[in-house]
Every structure is written in structure tokens, then in C-alpha cells.
């Protein structure tokens, strides 16, 4: 592979303009197709294989409902006592609802609150449900704007109006400002690292071109497959970060090579052949990790993983294709890396880590261990409108409904009662009475039968909100009571509703974590054993990953759930940690951690192969690979943490987890724990049974086959 990359690097540098123009042509085609197809992401997170979802589907079938159709709930709140029932308010609300109905032929019906009796007990608040005759995805921004425009005049009538529903009321924000912040910080880091604006700009340019291509393709695919909008955000996060990093690795290597090699074409070939091999290995590792999300068996995670993998693929391609081409254009402006004066590998950090490895190791473990403590109390949940930004209309609507109708109103539980066997009306009434007396139940509606009379719906309003642990316990209590209801009254009960679905979804994701983490750790051990021909190096690498992972999830729990530093990160509402965040964090951090492990230890391994001097090899690796890992990790951190400025708490939590995860793993594990343990184990670090060495395939990611070209 190294020889092939050597030739390709030279070719792309030699035919620089053809290469760059070809990429722009491909990008132009993607933009043109996107202009025709548009962007079609959804605000929902869905999955199959849940009992509560099967129950929900059965309700749709038996009661002739369609949950896929769009709906908007408009909340009206008066600033006057009993103001919602005054003749003026009734007239204004009735009129505006009629205008909304008339403005859009996609609207099937609107439930007038005065007819539907959807008025709060204190008569200050009411809500109207707008039902559409098309799917939620088909309710476009134009239709939503018609509702917003009609409601604008309600302020003059002392009525506050807010909106919620299953359609995307607030336009999707994929983090444009966040990307800009991340890019600016990355550029500053690169200028410091390279000492040149032009050299620093190349990784940024290639990353933008890579991101534009991959995001464009993902957006086109969204027209054919349902994708949650967080898919695009995650792909942007990862794609931008790794694209800059991979370009950085090759550019760093090029600047090292041109200290002795004056032919820039040959230097490009050597840089691409050596660092490019490591980039491909790193990229494949990340791709395998994010594609591994499909092992969890949850559809939206599979989609997110595949989209992120596509983003990483183009990051690798841009580093291997565009960086050589841009070097061909700007090679006269790119200066060689300066040799640092002083004893090779002898600096403050290496003196500490290599000179006092046990102390360095213990300090690092204590820090990560302390950060891991909150992980033990982590609660998982699916975000609802209650976790939206405070200034969003969805959050305001959620809070008003919660305040005026009860906390559980935003997450009603629905019970499907099957009475086909011996469940009489009296038995069904007895079941309903028992449920109304259960702990944390606020309201129970009378059973509503279907046309055939063999099924009935019972709506249960909990006393607590959808993400409350008490609501979760109520769901478990209802399911436990179902056995009694069946045996004693002949009523077969099934519990569903969005709260129950979210609880089941969180549980399934929680159950998937140990399996997924085990697969990832075993995969890492095998890959690193093949690369480094050692047993202890892979073992310390995966154990270090586990430690940085628990510290990351502990820190995220401390911020998102416990509220520590919440003001610093602009988090207005604390609650359970995003249910799929641990799985995503495991997959992505694994890939990135192995990147840094390979870039550091491949240099240490290369030096050890030549000298058999373990201490000297560690110092050399820290000196030569350390700076590029530091720059790369800081860039990763700046890109990920910039998404904390996004308004969506879901995006914030992902940014915090990935940002600090990279920081913990790169600085505490890869640059401290790994070299310290390698020093402590001495030559034993490189022990490999001869029989295993013969069995394992050979993998050259250090470019040894290019020695004859140097």
C-alpha cells in the first residue's frame, strides 16, 4: 500500500490543477442534485422491536389512527385572570383558527378548544390541535409559516401563543455558527503549529471541501431514507474534525521530509506513502467503529453510523488527494519543520513521564478515576420538548402545558385493553378504578372502545413529567399489574404512549452498551496486536480507552444530569443523559483513541525496531509524534466543543462528550499513561509469542517499504 500511495501522492501533486478541478466538478454535481432534491430530515428518533411500539401500531390499526400524519398543538395563554374564556378571547381564538384552516389545504381539521374542552382549570390557558392530511415530513416550512403568520396578531389581544407537535416547527440548525467557531480556533492552532498562514490554511480548505462533499451526499440520501436531523450534525462534527486532523498528519510528515529531501514531488510521495498509510488505517478504524453502531440493532443508530462513516471516508480521501495537490501548488510557501535544539527527545514532559513513570501513571489514573465517579449514577433518557432551549416555542409550549395541566400532561400513558376473552364492561371498569388509585397517577380517562368493541383505550396522566424516574416506575407498575388484570378480570393490558416508548428505547440502548463496548474493545486489541506485534501495548491501549471512556461519560453526567458547569456550557435544563450518547461516544472515541495510539506508538515501534532501546524509543516518539497529536487533539476538541454553542441540548451533550473525551484520551491516556506503562514494562512491552507472530498477518503502516526511495 505504501508504494501505491507514494505513486498517487506524486501524481496528484504533479497534476495538481486537474486534481483540484475534478474535486470541484464532483462537488458542483452534488450541489446541483441537492438543489433539485432538497433536504428532508426528520425531528423524530424512531426504532422498531419495542413492545410499546407494537402496541402503538395495533392501536392505529384497531382505532383507525395514523400517527405518521402531521399535527401541531397551538397553546394560547392569557395574561388576565380567567382571560381565556372571555368573549373577546373566544372570538379571537375562534377567528384565528378559522383563518389557519382556510390558509392551507393540507389541514384536515382543527379542534376548537371551546368545543373540545381543552381549557386549563384556572381558565387562563387553552390549546387547539391542528391535524394535517399529509405526513409530518410533508408539512413543510411554508405550511408552518402560515400558522405562525396567523398567530402574530394575538399578542395585541393579550394572548401568548406557542407551538408544539410532531412536525419540525423550528428549522433545523446543523451548527453553522458552531462550525465557524471550530474552524477559526483550528486555524489559530494550525498557524501556531506551522508558523505559516498558507500551510495552516491547507487542512482547513481540504476539510471544508471534504465536508461539503460528504454532507451534500448525506443530504441527497435523506430524500430516499428517513434520517433524524442529528445524523447530519454528527456527520459534520466528525467529518470536520478528522478531515483537519488527517490533512495535518500528512502535512506534518511532508515538512519533516523536506528538511533533507529537496524534490517536493518525491517528498509528497514519501509523506503520502508513510503518513498516508497511517491515515488510511486510522480512517478505517473510525469507519469500522461508527459502522459498528449497526451491531446495536437500532435503525437510527445504523443510519447515524453510516452517515458518519461516509463523512470519515471523504476526510481520508481529501487528505490523500487534495493535500498532495495543494502542496503541489504551494510547495514554495511551505517551510521545513525546524529541528529543535537540545538532546533528542529530552524535554520537560518526557523527563517527567519517562523519568517518573509510576508517579505519572498514578496521577493520571486518579484524575480519570475521579471523573468516572458520576458515571455510576448516570440515567438515560430520550429528549423531549422539555429539554429544548428556553427561548424556543416548543419549550415554552411544554412549560405552559406542564404548569397549567400538570407535569404528566406532556407524556400521557396509553393502555390498550383487549376484552375479547371475558373482559366485560364491569371488569374493565374495575381495572380502570384500580389504575386510578395507583401511586403517581393524576388522571385516568374512562375506557374508550373501538367500533368492534373488542378493544378499549385508557389514557393515564402521570403526576410527574415524561423524564421523571417516578414516571418510569409507574410504567413498570402498570405492566406488573397487567398480569393481575388478565388473570382476575380477563383484561389483557398493554402500555404505550410516547413516554413508555422513550423508556423502552432507553432500556434497549442501555442493554446494548455492554455488548457494543465488548465488541469494540476486542476489535481494538486484535487490530493493535497485528500492527505492533505485541500483547502488552494493545492491552494498555484498550484499558486506557475504557478508563478515558468512563471518565468522559462521568464528566458528561456531571454536566448534563447533575448541572455542574451547566451555566458555563449554556445548559438551561438538566435531566437524563441522552440515551444513545454512550453508544455514540464509545464508537467515535474508540476510533479517535486508536488514531492517536497508532500515530504515537508506530513511531515508538519504528525506533525500537531499529535500536532495541525502549527508553530512547519512547522519548523519540513523544518528541516527534507528540506535537502533532497535541495539535490534532486540540483541533478535535475545538471542533467538538464549538457545538456547545448550538441551541439544541442534544447537540450540546454530544459536543461535550466528544470534546472532553478527545481531551482526556489524548492528553491523559495516550501522552501520559501509555508511555509511562511502556517504560515500566520495559522490553516486556514488545513481547510477542513466536507462534502468534507467525500466524498474524503483516501490516506496514510505518512505510518501511519506502526505505529504498528515501
Image: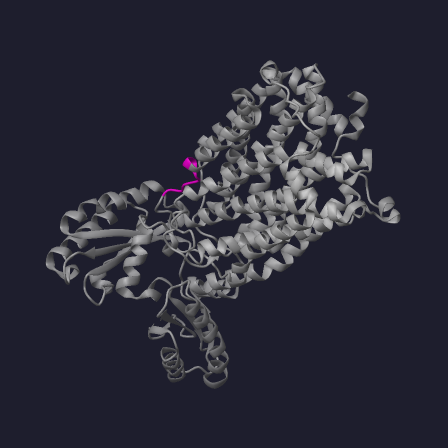
Instruction: Say if the magenta span includes residue 174.
Output: yes
Tell me the residue at 18%/53% (across/down): 159
Q: Nearer the viewer, residue 107 or 125?
A: 125
The picture places residue 145, in percent across and down from the top left corner, at 29, 42
Residue 184 vs 416, above or below: the answer is: above
> Which secondary structure is most common in the magenta stretch?
loop
The picture places residue 516, in percent across and down from the top left corner, at 63, 55
Instruction: Say if the magenta span includes residue 532.
Output: no
Residue 227 visible from this viewpoint: no
Q: Nearer the viewer, residue 553 or 313?
A: 553
Residue 429 vs 275, above or below: the answer is: below
Q: How is the image coloured?
A: one colour
Number of numbered callouts drawn = 0
Residue 315 vs 354, above or below: the answer is: above
Classify residue 256 by image quadrant. Answer: top right
Residue 551 visible from this viewpoint: yes
Q: Nearer the viewer, residue 113 or 172?
A: 172
Classify residue 81 by image quadrant. Answer: bottom left
Tell me the residue at 40%/47% (across/down): 568
Q: Which residues are magenta?
A: 171-177
Q: Is residue 670 left or right of residue 182?
A: right
Classify residue 672 by image quadrant. Answer: top right
The picture places residue 237, in percent across and down from the top left corner, at 51, 40
* Quadrant of the frame with the C terminus: top right
Amino acid at each position: 500500500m505504501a508504494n501505491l500511495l507514494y505513486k498517487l501522492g506524486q501524481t496528484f501533486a504533479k497534476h495538481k490543477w486537474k486534481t483540484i478541478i475534478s474535486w470541484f466538478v464532483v462537488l458542483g454535481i452534488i450541489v446541483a442534485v441537492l438543489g433539485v432534491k432538497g433536504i428532508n430530515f426528520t425531528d423524530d428518533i424512531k426504532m422498531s422491536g419495542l413492545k410499546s411500539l407494537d402496541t402503538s401500531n395495533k392501536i392505529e390499526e384497531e382505532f383507525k389512527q395514523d400517527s405518521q400524519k402531521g399535527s401541531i398543538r397551538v397553546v394560547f395563554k392569557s395574561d388576565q385572570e380567567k382571560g381565556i374564556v372571555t368573549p373577546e378571547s373566544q372570538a379571537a381564538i375562534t377567528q384565528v383558527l378559522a383563518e389557519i384552516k382556510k390558509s392551507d389545504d393540507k389541514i384536515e381539521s382543527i379542534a376548537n378548544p371551546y368545543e373540545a374542552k381543552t381549557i386549563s382549570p384556572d381558565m387562563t390557558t387553552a390549546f387547539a390541535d391542528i391535524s394535517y392530511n399529509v405526513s409530518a415530513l410533508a408539512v413543510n416550512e411554508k405550511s408552518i409559516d402560515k400558522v405562525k403568520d396567523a398567530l402574530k396578531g394575538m399578542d395585541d389581544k393579550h394572548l401568548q401563543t406557542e407551538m408544539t407537535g410532531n412536525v419540525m416547527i423550528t428549522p433545523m440548525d446543523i451548527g453553522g455558527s458552531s462550525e465557524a467557531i471550530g474552524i477559526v480556533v483550528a486555524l489559530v492552532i494550525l498557524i501556531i503549529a506551522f508558523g505559516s498562514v498558507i500551510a495552516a490554511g491547507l487542512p482547513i480548505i481540504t476539510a471544508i471541501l471534504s465536508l461539503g462533499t460528504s454532507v451534500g451526499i448525506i443530504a441527497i440520501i435523506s430524500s430516499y431514507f428517513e434520517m433524524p436531523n442529528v445524523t447530519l450534525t454528527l456527520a459534520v462534527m466528525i467529518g470536520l474534525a478528522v478531515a483537519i486532523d488527517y490533512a495535518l498528519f500528512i502535512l506534518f510528515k511532508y515538512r519533516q521530509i523536506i528538511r533533507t529531501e529537496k524534490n517536493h514531488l518525491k517528498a509528497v510521495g514519501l509523506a503520502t506513502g508513510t503518513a498516508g498509510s497511517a491515515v488510511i488505517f486510522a480512517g478505517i478504524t473510525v469507519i469500522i467503529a461508527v459502522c459498528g453502531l449497526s451491531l446495536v440493532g437500532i435503525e437510527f443508530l445504523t443510519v447515524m453510523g453510516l452517515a458518519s462513516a461516509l463523512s470519515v471516508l471523504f476526510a481520508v480521501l481529501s487528505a490523500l488527494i487534495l493535500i498532495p495537490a495543494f502542496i503541489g501548488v504551494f510547495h514554495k510557501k511551505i517551510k521545513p519543520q525546524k529541528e529543535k535544539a537540545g538532546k533528542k527527545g529530552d524535554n520537560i514532559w518526557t523527563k517527567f513521564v519517562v523519568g517518573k513513570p509510576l508517579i505519572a501513571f498514578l496521577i493520571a489514573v486518579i484524575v480519570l478515576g475521579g471523573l468516572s465517579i458520576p458515571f455510576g449514577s448516570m440515567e438515560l433518557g430520550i429528549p423531549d420538548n422539555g429539554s429544548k432551549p428556553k427561548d424556543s416555542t416548543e419549550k415554552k409550549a411544554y412549560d405552559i402545558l406542564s404548569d397549567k395541566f400538570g407535569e404528566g400532561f406532556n407524556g400521557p400513558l396509553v393502555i390498550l385493553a383487549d376484552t375479547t376473552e371475558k373482559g366485560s364492561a364491569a371488569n374493565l371498569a374495575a381495572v380502570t378504578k384500580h389504575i386510578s388509585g395507583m401511586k403517581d397517577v393524576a388522571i385516568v380517562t374512562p375506557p374508550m372502545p373501538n367500533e368492534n368493541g373488542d378493544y378499549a383505550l385508557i389514557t393515564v396522566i402521570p403526576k410527574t413529567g415524561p423524564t421523571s424516574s417516578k414516571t418510569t416506575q409507574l410504567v413498570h407498575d402498570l405492566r406488573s399489574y397487567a398480569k393481575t388484570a388478565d388473570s382476575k378480570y380477563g383484561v389483557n393490558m398493554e402500555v404505550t404512549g410516547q413516554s413508555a416508548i422513550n423508556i423502552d428505547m432507553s432500556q434497549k440502548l442501555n442493554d446494548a452498551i455492554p455488548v457494543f463496548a465488548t465488541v469494540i474493545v476486542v476489535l481494538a486489541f486484535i487490530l493493535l496486536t497485528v500492527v505492533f506485534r505485541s500483547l502488552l501495548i494493545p492491552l494498555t491501549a484498550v484499558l486506557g480507552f475504557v478508563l478515558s471512556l468512563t471518565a468522559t461519560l462521568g464528566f458528561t453526567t456531571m454536566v448534563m444530569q447533575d448541572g455542574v458547569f451547566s451555566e458555563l456550557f449554556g445548559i438551561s435544563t438538566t435531566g437524563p443523559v441522552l440515551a444513545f450518547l454512550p453508544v455514540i461516544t464509545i464508537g467515535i472515541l474508540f476510533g479517535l483513541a486508536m488514531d492517536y495510539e497508532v500515530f504515537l506508538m508506530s513511531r515508538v515501534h519504528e525506533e525500537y525496531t531499529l535500536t532495541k532501546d525502549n527508553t530512547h524509543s519512547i522519548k523519540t516518539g513523544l518528541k516527534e509524534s507528540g506535537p502533532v497529536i497535541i495539535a490534532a487533539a486540540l483541533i478535535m476538541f475545538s471542533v467538538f466543543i464549538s457545538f456547545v454553542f448550538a441551541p439544541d441540548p442534544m447537540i450540546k451533550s454530544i459536543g461535550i462528550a466528544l470534546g472532553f473525551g478527545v481531551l482526556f484520551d489524548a492528553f491523559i491516556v495516550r501522552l501520559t499513561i501509555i508511555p509511562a506503562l511502556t517504560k515500566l514494562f520495559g522490553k516486556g512491552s514488545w513481547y510477542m509469542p513466536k507462534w502468534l507472530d507467525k500466524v498474524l498477518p503483516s501490516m506496514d503502516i510505518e512505510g518501511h517499504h519506502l526505505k529504498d526511495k528515501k
